[in-house]
Amino acid sequence: MRVGVDANNGTAIENWQVQLRPAAMKGRELEPRFSFGSQKVAPSASSPAGSPSALVPAFTWCRAEFNLAAPSTEWSISWKLTFEAAVDALLYLNGKFVGRYAVAGPQRDFYLPDPYLVFDAKRKNVLTMVLAYTDGPQSVRTIRIGPYEEFATRRTRVEFEW
């Protein structure tokens, strides 16, 4: 098996680093203690000389961390993730599944439920992306966390006296 621009001129793969389990899952959620470090080295199965070998699609697990300050109690703010990539992806926020991005699909904005978010300057939110058919994060074009401005509302306190 070879890796490169084409199968005939690529570099021979001597061994693979294989993630034994891509992620420990609880239903649709990632196990909070999931580590990217459980790899083993496996020898490559060499193909017969002269036969073209198929390129195997890979999945890349990427993480992005960010902090969010607690919003003012005077406002009710919904948050969204804007995501664009050249490949399909699964998106997890703090281990919880928030959506599937498809290149062919129209969806670019994903709602981030308040209970999934951490509003603390000392603790980070972790966005995990599982990118399909790529071996690196270079296919990601946009990652942006921001408020759904059209859904932000000012809270008003109303008191009644009888």
Image (tube, rainbow, N blue to C red):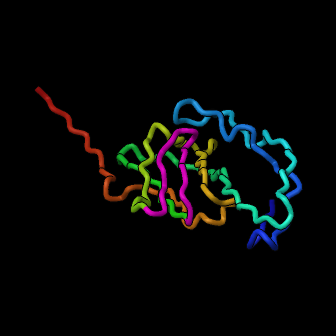
141 left or right, relative to 41 = left
How many numbered marks appear? 0
Tell me: residue 157, above or below residue 108: above
The image quadrant that residue 8 belongs to is bottom right
Considering the image in quadrants, where does the C terminus appear?
A: top left
Of 112 and 47, the residue lying toward us: 47
114 left or right, relative to 121 = left
Name the residue rendered at 87%, 48% in the picture: 43
Of 106 and 80, the residue lying toward us: 106
Question: Which residue, as the protein is rendered here, is positioned at the far top?
Answer: 162
Name the residue rendered at 49%, 39% in the picture: 116
Question: Which residue, as the protein is rendered here, is positioned at the far left?
Answer: 162
Tell me: residue 31, above or below residue 2: above
Tell me: residue 119, above or below residue 104: above
Q: Position of residue 9 (x, y in %)?
A: 81, 73
Name the residue rendered at 89%, 56% in the picture: 14
Q: Position of residue 118 (x, y in %)?
A: 54, 41
Tell me: residue 30, above or below residue 153: above
Start and end of the magenta stretch? 86-104
Q: Position of residue 1 (x, y in %)?
A: 80, 59
Q: Position of residue 78 (x, y in %)?
A: 39, 49
